[in-house]
Image (spheres, rainbow, N blue to C red):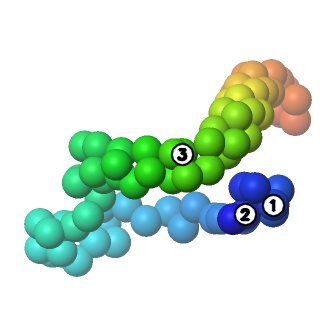
Amino acid sequence: MAVLNATKINHFNAGFGADTLIDGTQKTALWPHNRDGGNDSALQALLRAWPQILPLLVEEDKRLHRQLLLKKILRRLPFGRKAAG
């Protein structure tokens, strides 16, 4: 498993939105099931099998939260903005 082996997994935001969906395809999509707790039993089974993974996931979540917070703060600063006038 990537987390236990400290292997970084890269992903990208493809920017898919409502304008890229095909009419009718979301009526049977899996994401509403997952959003409403459908993955909970799978996640619980994973954590029962590999309990050592939880602290790693928690730490990664904290790291990502700090990174996002820093980006939000930096966006508010006037670096690189052209002077009005």
Can residue 67 be seen from the camera position used here? yes
Residue shown at the point (83%, 33%) measured from the top left: 82
State the image quarter where residue 44 is shown: top left
For marks 3 and 2, give the CA distance.
14 Å
Amino acid on which disc 3 is placed = Leu
Q: Earlier in the sequence, mark 1 or mark 3?
A: 1
Q: Tell me the quarter of the image containing the C terminus.
A: top right
Mark 3: which secondary structure? Answer: helix
* Callout in the foreground (3, 2): 3
Amino acid on which disc 1 is placed = Asn
Mark 2: which secondary structure? Answer: loop
Mark 1: which secondary structure? Answer: loop
For marks 1 and 3, give the CA distance.
16 Å
Could you tell me if the residues under marks 2 and 1 are in contact, i.e. CB atoms within 8 Å?
yes
Can residue 71 be seen from the camera position used here? no
The answer to whether residue 45 is left or right of residue 59 is left
Query: Where does the image place residue 27, in percent across and percent down from the top left?
Result: 11, 66
To which residue does mark 2 refer? Answer: 2
Q: Which mark is residue 5?
A: 1
Residue shown at the point (54%, 67%) measured from the top left: 14
Above or below, comparing residue 41 to residue 9 in the picture: above
To which residue does mark 3 refer? Answer: 47
